[in-house]
Image (cartoon, rainbow, N blue to C red):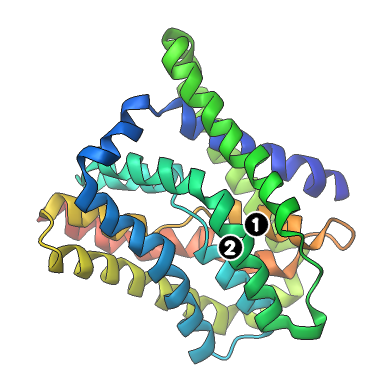
Amino acid sequence: MDLLIGVGLPLSLAIIMLSLGIGLEVADFRRVLQRGHAFAIGAVCQVLLLPIAAFITVTLFALPPEIAVGFMILSLCPGGVTSNILSKLAKADVALSVSLTAVISLLSILTVPILAAWSINHFMGSDAPEVSITGLAVAMFLITTLPVAIGVSLRHFARSFADRVDAPLSKAATVLFVLIVIAALAGNWQLFVENLGIMGAGLITLNIALLLIGLGLARAAKLSWTESKTISIETGIQNSTLGITLAALITGTESGFSPLALPSAVYGITMYVVVLPFLAWFRNR
């Protein structure tokens, strides 16, 4: 189990982030300047409104400290490859989705360690594990930012190779995601069963609220319907694999998968149930 968490989990996330980078162009980052208004709305939703909504949710549902921290960790994670795929299925603005995912993923090495450390101290108090913000930032760089940068570089300098490995990497990323979720649930099965009702209700409520908040804010800002669908998805869909990995980095590997990983693991299942009606609505309008 220690080998799976200490080596397999970070390596799996790195492969997932590499698959994200392989699909990115340098132009995706330049597009941020061209789509400044829409990008700013999406960034505000992801970086500011997401953690605020999660904080309100865990407070209203009076979740246990470790589960509450898990919610907060999940809320700090960017969309990842999944949000890009869902944007395509929803006939949304895929280019905007990719730009948001790329930039917010890179910025996460600055935002996530600080906010994660605050969440742990706030909810767990004297029971909080010691968190090194610098160490967490370095780990975030190695398993998220660096693989994305390598993927973008491969796309730019070796396009034919990138095209060949893009599909296999995406499939491998999907398989790894499923295995990680199963392992996290199995490692905390009793805690999962005891808290499934309130945790599931909280996650589904938060997920629906975020999808609607993103959509409502985008419409209020007079973005196009296509852009608004993208903002909704980018706000409501998080990288649950990153959430599970962050939980492991924070608590170490001695006790197996951390209870802090449970919300991300359960969310990895419930988000598809929640988002399907939204996809049907988005595709038909």
Q: Residue at x 15, y 50 (%)?
A: 226
| Three-letter residue code for mark 1 | Ile
Few, some or many residues within 10 Å of mark 1 (<14, 14–19, 20+): many
Alpha-carbon distance for marks 2 and 1? 6 Å
Residue positioned 48% across, 75% down in the render: 54
The residue shown at (31%, 27%) is 27
Which residue lies under the disc numbered 1? Answer: 244
Q: Earlier in the sequence, mark 2 or mark 1?
A: 1
Q: Are marks 2 and 1 in contact (CB under 8 Å)?
A: yes
Q: Residue at x 10, y 61 (%)?
A: 222
Location of residue 235 (image quadrant): bottom left
Q: Position of residue 17 (x, y in %)?
A: 55, 37
Give neighbour class at mark 2: few <14, some 14-19, many 20+ (Cα, 10 Å).
many
Residue 163 visible to the viewer: no
Q: Is residue 41 above or below residue 20?
A: below
> Which secondary structure, mark 1?
helix
Q: Find residue 183 and name its label.
A: none
- Nearer the observer, 123 or 205: 123
Q: Is residue 25 left or right of residue 189?
A: left
Q: Which residue is mark 2?
A: 264
Q: Is residue 50 left or right of residue 39?
A: right
Residue 31, position in %: x, y?
Answer: 26, 35
Secondary structure state at the residue bearing disc 2: helix
Vertically, is 156 above or below 65?
above
Q: How many marks?
A: 2
Q: Position of residue 282 (x, y in %)?
A: 18, 56
Query: Of the residues shown, which amino acid type is indicated by label 2?
Result: Ser
User: x, y percentage for residue 178?
Assistant: 59, 47
Q: Nearer the viewer, residue 121 or 57?
A: 121
